[in-house]
Amino acid sequence: MAESIKTDVVIVGAGIIGLAIAFQVASDGRDVVVIDPNDPGSGASYGNAGTLAPYACAPVGNPDVLRNLPSLLVNRDSPLAVRPAALPALFPWLSRFLWQSTPVRARRNAYALAELLKDAMPTWRELAEQARLSDLIRYEGCLYLYRGKMPREDGEWGARLRNELGVRQERLTSEEVARLEPALPRASGGILFPDAAHIVDPAALTGRLAVAAAAKGASFERARVDRLQPQDGGQIRLACSDRSIEAQTVVLAAGAWSRDLAAQAGEKIPLDTERGYHIEFAMDTCPIKRPVSPVDLGFYATPMTGRLRVAGTVELGGLSAPLNPKQTALLERGVRKLFPDLGAVQSRWLGFRPSLPDSLPVIGHSRRYPNLIYAFGHGHLGMTLAGATSRMVASLIENRNEALNLDAFRPDRFA
Ligand SMILES: Cc1cc2nc3c(=O)[nH]c(=O)nc-3n(C[C@H](O)[C@H](O)[C@H](O)COP(=O)(O)OP(=O)(O)OC[C@H]3O[C@@H](n4cnc5c(N)ncnc54)[C@H](O)[C@@H]3O)c2cc1C
């Protein structure tokens, strides 16, 4: 007979979002069960660029991307690729993405993102302190590197928007870039985001966050949730192959895999994945001190413990196709333009960003089932937004009287 588990809160998914929520909610004294068939932190949260990027308020879909789309799609070295076989399935997401990239919508999305991002660093500092993770975070800022001509201050949509939203960004001359990061080749200039930080080992961070949540009383079940079962009383029960779980609150935080589960609760949410890649080079001391993104190449090189990680590219192509070696070769060609003497690539990885067409996550109650809360779809910013999201979800669960305005993140905003 299937085992039946009862608890206060069950969290589906042990990525950075589910783990941060588990830690907060267990700290509030709730009985928490986290359910995932895989090791904590082994999804997108494992292989990302590790930046905590409070400056990144420009949505992926924006007027610059719209204008440059033809060259982004045909250029061999473009950081954007689409798998032709996936095009029919992608069509609804893509058409919404293009619609959200128009100036008025992109600007509205940027303002909503900026509201979340303004809490990103304070909430991360708090979470890192409470869960004893501070040694894994470096506060050195992030650097955009311009190898070609440096754009005018208001020359790019994203830069104009960051100015408008009061994001701290410092324009650097070629000499200033060289002083900051002497190992980089000569650039025409850069933009330093001094309030950003980076994680030196995302896998260690999620592993230790899981241990910290367990120390607060959270328990971990290794199983895949197969079905969300609405009950007569309007509650949701979770069914796995060998057990079922009943909870006062169910939190759906299964990253890029959340769409089909939400659909079982009757909610049609246009979540898809932007596949992203990394390659790593083993080294004791990295040539750079902080994440560097050469803007024309579209990746981040991030100094991590024992290695340089080069992460990025967007490949639209669904969850099932295997790693595409063209994408990792692109990252390798790109990073060798910065550091020609790098040794052999040590590892290659493919991960699945959970992405909505407007670059905003889904955070809040299901419209149909009061005990179901959504927390997924953080796209390029899940590491950055984990602290802020977990605090909001904990407030929803505890009915805390904080002035939460989750309108922009509603699950039914595309209906
Ligand atoms: C190349 C790349 C670079 C990135 N760089 C950055 C960066 O620099 N900064 C930043 O902020 N973000 C970055 N991101 C984005 C960030 O990694 C993601 O937004 C974040 O990891 C998403 O976290 P998550 O917890 O929602 O999902 P995940 O980490 O993917 O976790 C989801 C979990 O749900 C589980 N699951 C799935 N289905 C089920 C089921 N049916 N039952 C139970 N469990 C299930 C999975 O096993 C998985 O463990 C990057 C992403 C990529 C790919």
Image (cartoon, rainbow, N blue to C red):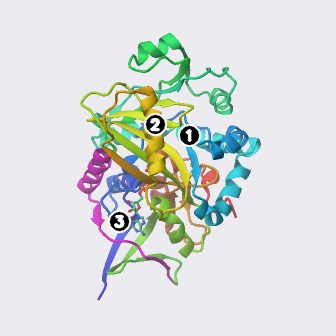
Magenta-drawn stretch contains 147: no
Q: Nearer the viewer, mark 1 or mark 3?
A: 1
Instruction: Say if residue 254 shows up in the picture.
Output: yes
The image quarter containing residue 58 is top right
Residue situated furthest top in the rendering: 175
Q: Give the image location of residue 130, x and y in percent.
A: 31, 42
Q: Which residue is mark 2?
A: 333
* Label 1 vs 3, first from the N-terminus: 3
Q: Which residue is mark 3?
A: 36
- Label 2 sits on what residue type? Arg
Q: Give the Cα distance between marks 2 and 1.
A: 9 Å
Q: Is the C-beta separation of discs 2 and 1 under 8 Å?
A: yes
The C terminus: image quadrant: bottom right
The crowd level at tag 2 (other Cα within 10 Å; few <14, some 14-19, many 20+) is few
**Left or right of residue 39, residue 380 in this image:** right
Magenta segment boundaries in residue numbering: 203-231
In this view, 346 is above or below 151: below
Residue situated furthest bottom in the rendering: 1
Q: Is mark 2 within 8 Å of ligand 1?
A: no
The N terminus: image quadrant: bottom left
**Left or right of residue 241, residue 189 in this image:** right
Q: Give the Cα distance between marks 1 and 3.
A: 36 Å
Q: Which mark is residue 116?
A: none
Q: Which residue is mark 1?
A: 77
The crowd level at tag 3 (other Cα within 10 Å; few <14, some 14-19, many 20+) is many
